[in-house]
Image (cartoon, rainbow, N blue to C red):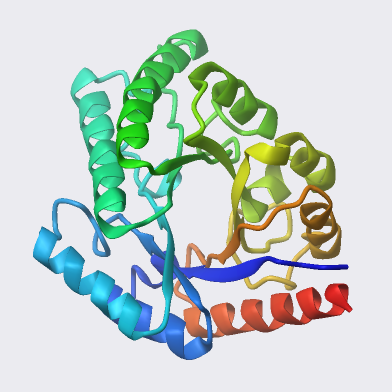
Amino acid sequence: MAMSIGLSCCTLGYARSTSLEEAIGRIARIGYKGVDLYTGSPHLFPEDYTKAERAQVSKLIDKAGLKLTGFAVGGGALALQLNFSSHRPSLRRKTLEYYLDNVKMAGEMGCPVINVLTGNVAFGTSRKQAMEWTMAALHDLTGQAEKDKVVLGLHPQYIAESPLMTMVDDALEMVDELKSKYVKIIFDTAQQNISNRNFEDDLRKCGKHLFYVHAADNDGIDWTHDACGKGTVNWRGMLRVLNEIGFTGKICVQAWSPLPNDVDTVMADSKAYLDGLLKEMAA
């Protein structure tokens, strides 16, 4: 079975313990060839990094022998202050501005994709209203993405983060409404292991719309992003279907835990497991 899938690694797991620059170096030393940058503070938060500093980050990535594969934006349970469906207009504006800044920064740094997260819906806001606010913002964001030639990766989450885009079907409906070649889907194994474990059918549904995969494991109950192979994710089935649908994008390893953890080990274990599985399935 021919497998033309590359691995990348996200700095998100290091956000509580190291600087962005240190995280990039660690990811390179572990042996990854791609890096995905977390754009929440204290990593590549757009307001915190000047153009000159961003250029230095790009040089560091090149010097480390890495390729920039994506941005992981702040949002969901990790950044409740960013929410397209907030009942507060000022917060909705702030959220759109943050995403627009991410798209512009991605274009500037040659980053191909950013993830897009829907937000929490507070009591008193109907789902219909929340979706109207969200889609209005995404239409604006799509215009900027087309201008900068950056893909918006719609990222289904699990129910505790947002009720608006928990399933691949939700993302596909949004893709259909936005009607742009720059709107695709990011499939997150840790999120979907909780929301809907039928990865194989969901990936087939994504088909040509699938652009990127976030890879992590868990037990299907607790919202964690553990090392690949340490939980209940069906990795062989997932990789088999990725090959079946002709996916040639990146699998980006992520790590996150509500408690401090050894991120280096999680990243190294994930790489060893996925490398081994890809090699085995290609034989």
- Image x and y of residue 35, in percent: 44, 70
In the rendered image, residue 49, in percent from the top left (x then y), is placed at 15, 60
**Residue 18 seen from this side:** no
Residue 19 falls in which quadrant of the image? bottom left
Relative side of 6 to 126, left or right: right
Place residue 11 in its image quadrant.
bottom left
Horizontally, residue 55 falls left or right of residue 25, namely left
User: Is 43 situated left or right of 153 in this image?
Assistant: left
Examine the rendering and report whether any part of residue 241 can be seen. Answer: yes
Q: Quadrant of residue 91?
A: top left
Point 53% across, 69% down: residue: 8
- Image: 114 above or below 156: below
Residue 134 as seen in the image, left or right of residue 204:
left
Q: Residue at x 74, y 66 (%)?
A: 231
Q: Is residue 79 above or below residue 254?
A: above
Q: Nearer the viewer, residue 223 or 63?
A: 63
The one nearer the camera, 184 or 21, is 184
The picture places residue 247, in percent across and down from the top left corner, at 70, 53
